[in-house]
Image: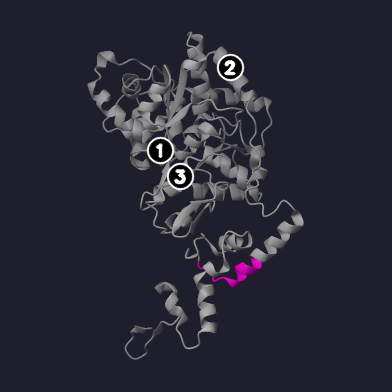
């Protein structure tokens, strides 16, 4: 699998900030540089947001190159795009500006979200899904479930995102208009790295349906001048309703599930806690759970411009002037239902499997537990791993040496060099020689 999250090694200083923030412990620091364990990465973008040196980035398409690759290009904007602009009072201004910069057609993911929500009301009556039903709209969450919570795969609704559904419908519309299939290029405009990765590796589709992904922050810069130049007479009514646009913030998708008791969870740490509770049998009293890896939903994605709290305020103001939703035709409902039938359930990815052989896996597990008990348990990150448990696993799996632990080095120095100060090799917060002076209250070392 090709991930969109990548490291710029020249900028990386090995500061260990990223390894302590990664929710799946997918990052290590070795030889002074961070490295990503690709089978554990879910492309949530947390490392992109926390890196103080901007050494982590998301690989995505260039706007101008995307427009030049195909004779006929279609933009599929995520509604999070609308919340990035100051003093915007009409979503149609953004959509018309996309046409002005060179796109030939627009198909909002908000429009497909409305149809998807409408069809799902009937879908659930005819298809058995374990309760509570889990939203598959966030690719990072779906991949997290695949690698860490495989017992919950049966709780997932049909795995297709509004962006992917919009791409399928947009391509069909262009082909019906007589555009040759080879001339059509469909590009999503997305707020996060997980949706960039989903272009080349969709979770529930047999093949890719998008030709590339553009970051909202890149498109934002291209749109500023065309938006200023548009006159009211030139603006075409292209926007969908408020129901689809509300999917950009946490709780928007859940609200579209009419009549269902729902829970909306945002932030990857909170998502993991919720999934752990469900896995442990502590089922919440809800029919549907919306899960978003980013804070405040897609508005908190690492490829946005505005902070998620301000963006949510702006988007709520925008959608207040929009109609509730577009009522899909019977033909559109049948078309989307057929697409849902063709989706596939994601499979378990044995990322954390120690060994294919169960006996050897148990032996390695025992070695990991034994080594972990000998470690200090401080999660200092000095070894390049996010925790002592992860470091012990790295040692047993051959990815690290036991001497990478600075505390183990201190103990060895203490035995080999009598009279030396082994604590001198430790970072200041971890030295044990500090003591309080009863006489003057000073701390000496």
Mark 1 nearby-residue class (10 Å; few <14, some 14–19, many ≥20):
many
Residue 409 appears at what percent x and percent y?
52, 74
Q: Residue at x 50, y 36 (%)?
A: 197
Find out whether the residues at labels 2 and 1 contact each other: C-beta distance under 8 Å. Answer: no
- The nearer-to-camera label among 1 and 3 is 3
Disc 3 designates what residue?
A: 6
Point out the residue furthest to the right here: 359
Q: Which residue is more in the foreground, 321 or 413?
A: 413
Q: Tell which of 419 and 150 is nearer to you.
A: 419
- Please report the residue visible at 55 percent of the width from the left and 83 percent of the height from the top: 415
Q: Is residue 402 among what the camera can see?
A: yes
Query: Where does label 1 land, which residue?
Result: 299
Residue 6, given in percent of the width and then of the height, sits at 45, 44
Give the structural element (helix, strand or loop) at label 3. Answer: strand
Mark sitting earlier along the chain (1/3): 3
Residue where numbered disc 2 is placed: 335
The quarter of the image holding the N terminus is top right
Q: Which mark is residue 417?
A: none
**What secondary structure characterizes most of the magenta part?**
helix
Region rendered in magenta: 369-378
The reply to whether the magenta stretch includes residue 376 is yes
Image coords of residue 60 (percent x, y): 43, 35
């Amino acid at each position: 699998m090709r991930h969109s999250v990548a490291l710029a090694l020249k900028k990386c200083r090995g500061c260990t900030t990223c390894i302590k923030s990664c929710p799946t412990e997918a990052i290590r620091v070795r030889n002074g540089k961070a490295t990503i364990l690709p089978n554990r990465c879910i492309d949530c973008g947390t490392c992109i947001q926390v890196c103080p040196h901007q050494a982590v980035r998301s690989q995505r398409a260039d706007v101008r190159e995307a427009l030049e690759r195909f004779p006929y290009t279609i933009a599929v904007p995520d509604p999070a795009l609308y919340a990035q602009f100051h003093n915007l009072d009409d979503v149609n201004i953004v959509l018309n500006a996309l046409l002005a910069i060179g796109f030939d057609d627009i198909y909002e993911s908000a429009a497909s979200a409305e149809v998807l929500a409408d069809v799902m009301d009937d879908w659930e009556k005819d298809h058995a899904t374990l309760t509570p039903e889990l939203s598959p709209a966030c690719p990072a969450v779906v991949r997290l479930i695949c690698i860490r919570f495989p017992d919950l795969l049966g709780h997932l609704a049909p795995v297709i995102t509004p962006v992917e559904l919009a791409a399928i419908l947009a391509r069909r519309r262009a082909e019906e208009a007589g555009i040759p299939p080879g001339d059509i290029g469909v590009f999503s405009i997305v707020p996060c790295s997980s949706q960039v990765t989903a272009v080349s590796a969709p979770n529930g589709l047999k093949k890719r349906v998008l030709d590339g992904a553009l970051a909202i922050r890149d498109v934002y810069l291209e749109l500023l001048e065309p938006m200023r130049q548009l006159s009211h007479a030139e603006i075409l009514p292209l926007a969908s309703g408020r129901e689809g646009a509300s999917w950009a913030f946490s709780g928007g998708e859940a609200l579209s599930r009419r009549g269902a008791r729902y829970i909306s969870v945002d932030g990857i740490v909170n998502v993991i806690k919720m999934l752990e509770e469900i896995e442990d049998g502590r089922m919440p009293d809800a029919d549907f759970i919306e899960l978003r890896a980013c804070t405040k939903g897609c508005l908190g994605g690492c490829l946005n411009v505005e902070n998620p709290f301000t963006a949510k305020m702006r988007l709520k103001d925008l959608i207040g002037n929009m109609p509730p939703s577009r009522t899909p035709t019977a033909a559109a409902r049948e078309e989307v239902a057929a697409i849902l039938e063709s989706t596939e359930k994601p499979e378990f990815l044995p990322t954390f499997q120690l060994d294919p052989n169960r006996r050897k896996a148990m032996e390695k597990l025992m070695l990991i537990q034994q080594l972990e008990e000998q470690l200090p348990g401080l999660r200092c990150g000095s070894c390049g791993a996010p925790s002592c448990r992860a470091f012990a696993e790295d040692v047993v799996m051959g990815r690290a040496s036991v001497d990478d632990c600075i505390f183990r080095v201190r103990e060895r120095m203490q035995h080999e060099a009598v009279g030396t100060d082994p604590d001198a090799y430790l970072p200041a917060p971890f030295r044990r020689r500090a003591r309080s002076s009863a006489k003057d209250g000073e701390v000496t070392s």
